[in-house]
Amino acid sequence: VVRRRLLQRYEHQPFISCLAGFYSCRWKRYQRERTEPGKCCCNMVNELKISTHLDSSFCFSLVFLYTWGEGKNDYNSFDWYNYGNLGFWFLWSLVILIVAAVLFTYVSLLLVLATCLLAEGQQLYLHWSHKIGTFLVLGFSISSLFALSILWRDHRKTVRLSFQVTAPYLHIGAIAIMVLLAWPVALHAIRADKKVTQVIIVGPYLAVLLFLFLIPLGMYSPCIREMGTLGPKPALIGHRGAPMVGHTEMSFLKTIEHGGDGLETDVAISYDGVPFLMHDDTLRRTTNIQDVYPNDTGKAASLFSWDALQKLNAGTWFLKNKPFVGMGSLSKADQNQAMNQSIYTLSSFLRLADSHNKLVIFDLYRPPEKHPYRNLWIRKILDIILKESKIKRHLVLWLHNSVRSFVQSVAPGFQHTMGRKAPIEDLLKHNIVKLNLVYTDMSSEDIR
């Protein structure tokens, strides 16, 4: 019996060697010291003080990973902000997400190793390289959270809203972790030689467990509801079209193909008076202007004639630099279609929407100074809508606010939309029927 036990312990040593090696770089058996579960010593107290930093690193890295992960709806705005400051397009949001995930995984593995070593009765000794690593993770997480709270305050609303969806799953995950920790906690508590030590071990565990059991009493989630109480599906409007080559015929066709209820775009006017779809001030990011007009890459898009704009390709950039996080690979047919996209006119856009009975909403960009249509741009847009495309007026969500009364007089029938909150009296006075707001500016009460 004794021999069998010794053999089992010997065969068990490689597993403990791996745990101790990865955690404290003590791969040899003589380098390790055992400590009976529940026993306390000076070295253990000192090591537990240091492991507090490991626990703090885990908590802060988890909070940052969750906070940044739930901001995916605004990744494009973040990348666009960096593009405006750096001058080149790159998915910085994805880089930060990967870094946050790697740091959290690193700290989590260290915690798992520490838990396993304690369960095996091994004395903890965190290697100095891991100590530096945990301090770096802690510093990065705290500084990142601080920067988010200062520069991106609206994101806090997004995180709070996200708990309505994720809270039930986070709760189940937390319960599962507590169940897994039950055995090592019980082992150390039972073998503790002092009542005070038992209370110190069991007390926090039971407090956390009780807290988790009481959470459902105050939890609200729209994902948990009675059968048959789910409201109708909201109308979906493709922002610059579907996640394809933005502002092109392909992106709008994909939106229609996937059942979108409306199309959104941005409108500029060429130097010779042709309204076209373009979001950026210049053509550098979304066309091949570097190849066609290399000396005019910084020139405003509205200062080009329509003939010049027609010579540009508006799709090849999409295949070279993926603009969306998590964007999958396109089929061969979609790749060929994307490579042949050109700048789209407002007239063609309106005809397409009208033929499929889709709503349209657009931001209008006033031409720069010395542009021949700087003071005639609204009239030009209205001529395209009313005379050239002849789209059904109730499909137009008119957003521009500066000449709203004039538009209402010459083009009755538009659904006038405002881009900010206002009292009901003001909305009725100006015949506003819809609001176009950032989702963080809307509360449940506003929606109701």
Image (tube, rainbow, N blue to C red):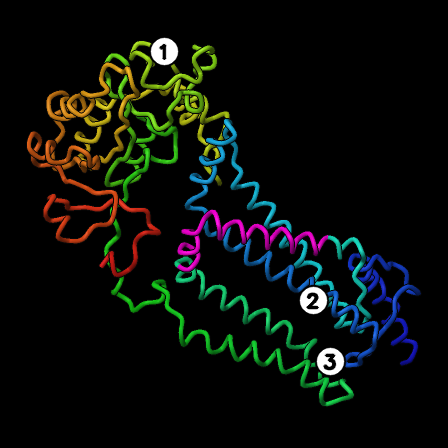
Marks 3 and 1, the one that precedes in the sequence:
3
Residue hosting label 2 = 52
Where's residue 401, x and y in %? 20, 37
Quote the CA–CA distance across marks 3 and 1: 75 Å
What is the three-letter code of the residue carrying label 1?
Answer: Lys
Residue hosting label 3 = 188
Magenta stretch holds residue 157: yes
Secondary element at tag 2? helix
Quote the CA–CA distance across marks 3 and 2: 19 Å
Do callouts 2 and 1 mark residues in contact (Cβ within 8 Å)? no
Residue at 42%, 39% (x, y): give it.
77
Residue 19 located left or right of residue 344: right
Marks 3 and 2, the one that precedes in the sequence:
2
Residue hosting label 1 = 311
Where's residue 412, x and y in %? 7, 35
- Closer-to-camera residue (303/254): 303
- Closer-to-camera residue (150/379): 150
Secondary element at tag 3? helix
Picture layout, residue 112 above or below residue 341: below
- The picture quadrant where one finds residue 288 is top left
What is the three-letter code of the residue carrying label 2?
Answer: Thr
Where's residue 440, x and y in %? 35, 51
Where's residue 82, x and y in %? 49, 35
Magenta range: 133-160
Classify mark 1: residues with Cα within 10 Å, few (<14), some (14-19) or many (20+).
some
Residue farthest front in this picture: 369
- The picture quadrant where one finds residue 108 is bottom right
Secondary element at tag 1? loop
